[in-house]
Image: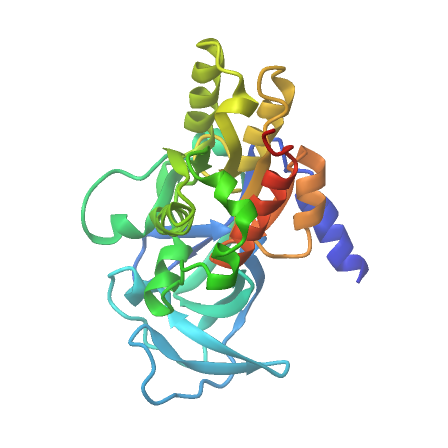
Amino acid sequence: MAGILDSVDQRTQLVGENRLEILMFRLAGRQLFAINVFKVQEVLQMPKLTLMPHRHRFVCGVVNLRGQTLPVIDLSQAIGMRPIVPDERSTIIVTEYNRSVQAFLVGGVDRILNLNWESILPPPGGAGRQHYLTAITKVEEQLVEIIDVEKVLAEIVPYNAKISGDRLADPVLERACGREVLLVDDSSVALAQLRETLSQLGLKMHVATDGLKGLNMLKKWADAGEVMTDKLLMVFTDAEMPEMDGYRLTTEIRQDPRLKDLYVVLHTSLSGSFNEAMVKKVGCDNFLSKFQPDKLVDVIRERLMLDEPSA
């Protein structure tokens, strides 16, 4: 337990400082890829792999890890590269995204690196595996491609954006119709899910694909004389994004007198034990794991209840 708490404390030191740790690895070639260490539970040699009938073509099979059955996803094949053939020497990265745990088969792990988000840039446009990247960076003059794991997982298990009927029937939600929200996220999959869900409430949506763009939008509105709490019902921000992450964005919002009273929701695929500490440190109003349409609506209802109904 002490080890877990030490890890939580160590990682929360990065929150609000616009820094992140990445785990770098290779797939079916020499190119370096990475994911956020926050999402990683462990890296290990693959236990005995069991093949499953009718499995998705990206899923190699399942492994049993301390009584938990996990799917093993060939990350190389999932992003459009040649498959990795698993054997007893194979390495897997066990991760947690959106309250689910899965293992990714990789070609080999390189190392963990601490970086500044300012050195993380959006990927170039183009075809092929570029569609599976959220960002790129350079380490010792070598390009590192940061994978959009949310997109990979959504192609294996499609997300549901539909709000249940009992939630939609809530009269409080009628007050959401026509209100404006800002969505800040670098994942096209996450933005699509948010749009599909929020459009059912009649909300008007503004979109920024990283924290810096989101902050600039907010400041532009404030510079134009907008009262920000009148203009925006709330801000939804992802945690990890190129150039400026969601923690730093929230910190900047709280430090600007014109923006500080905005209702900010951290909307992220991170679902580990350190989220509560992160949210408290930077001053978010609420936290929500992604791809939960009814819980998303519950958060909006909580925000609407803070306003007195019009007389």
User: What residue is rendered at 53% in x and 34% in y?
Assistant: 234
**Residue 303 placement (x, y as % from top left):** 60, 40
User: What residue is rendered at 42% in x and 22% in y?
Assistant: 217
Location of residue 229 by image quarter:
top right
Left or right of 99 on screen, residue 83: left
**Residue 57 placement (x, y as % from top left):** 29, 76
Q: Quadrant of the N terminus?
A: bottom right
Q: Quadrant of the C terminus?
A: top right
Left or right of 79 on screen, residue 294: right
**Residue 190 placement (x, y as % from top left):** 40, 50
Q: How is the image coloured?
A: rainbow
Left or right of 256 on screen, residue 5: right
Q: Residue furthest left?
A: 127
Image height of 297 relative to 48, above or below? above
Q: Residue furthest front?
A: 311
Give the number of marks: 0
